[in-house]
Each structure stands twice: as structure tokens, then as C-alpha cells.
Image: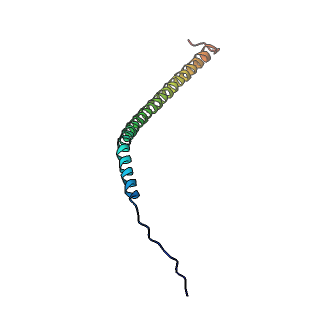
Amino acid sequence: MAVRAKTTLKVVDNTHEEAEAAFAEAAKQTAPMVERFSAHRERIGLAVKELEGERFELVSRRDLLRRQAEAIEAGFASHLADIEATLKLYEAGLNSTEMVD
């Protein structure tokens, strides 16, 4: 014969209802903190987006200034090359031994 384990039923007390009431009260108390946290998180998110926009604008300006400086430098280099070539022509003309009438 199989031996059956005896099971006893216990009367459940109201501690689960007390726990639910405590959780509900805790939720009521934490709701304002969660709302403030969410508001701060949104403000921080907006500040981060604003800073990212400013960063993008500054990087764009820096790149534009870099390109302008490179163009100016290339222009000066071209002018200096023209001046040096002209000087060489004049020097070659001054050092020539032929006389022009």
C-alpha cells in the first residue's frame, strides 16, 4: 500500500492584504519622486541635445574657417610663386650681356 502524506490546510491570514496596502502606500509616496525624476531627465535630455547642436555648429564653423585659411594660404603661395618667377625674369634680363637698342 502506498503511504499518503498528510497535508494540512492552514488558514491564510490577512498579511497579503496588508502587504498590498503597504505597496500601494509606497507607490503613492514614490509617484512624486518619479515625476520629478522624469522631469529632470527630460531637462537633461534637452540640454544634451542643445549642447550637441552647439557642438555641431562649432565643428562646422571650424571646418569652414579651416577651408578659408587653406584657400588664403594657397592664394598667397600662388602670388609668391608669381613674384619669384617675375623676379627671376627681371634678374635674367639684368644679367644678360646683350644690349637692347
Residue 69 location in percent, x, y?
A: 49, 26
**Residue 50 versus residue 92 in the image, above or below:** below
Q: How is the image coloured?
A: rainbow
Along the horizontal axis of the image, is 66 left or right of 89?
left
Above or below — where is 84 with respect to 56? Answer: above
x and y percentages locating residue 88 in the rendered image:
60, 19
Quadrant where the image shows the C terminus: top right
| Direction bottom: furthest residue | 1
Front position in the image: 28 or 87: 28
* Residue 36 placement: quadrant: top left
Q: How many numbered marks does the figure carry?
A: 0
Q: Residue at x 51, y 28 (%)?
A: 70
Q: 15 or 33: nearer the eye?
A: 15
Residue 63: image location, x then y, percent: 47, 32
- Residue 53 located left or right of residue 74: left
Figure quadrant of the N terminus = bottom right
Query: In the displayed structure, would residue 4 be above or below residue 21?
Result: below
> Residue 51: where, in percent of width, then height?
42, 33
Residue at point 37% right, 57% down? 17
Q: Work out whether residue 80 or residue 19 is closer to the camera in this orientation and state it.
A: 19
Residue 94, located in which quarter of the rendered image?
Answer: top right
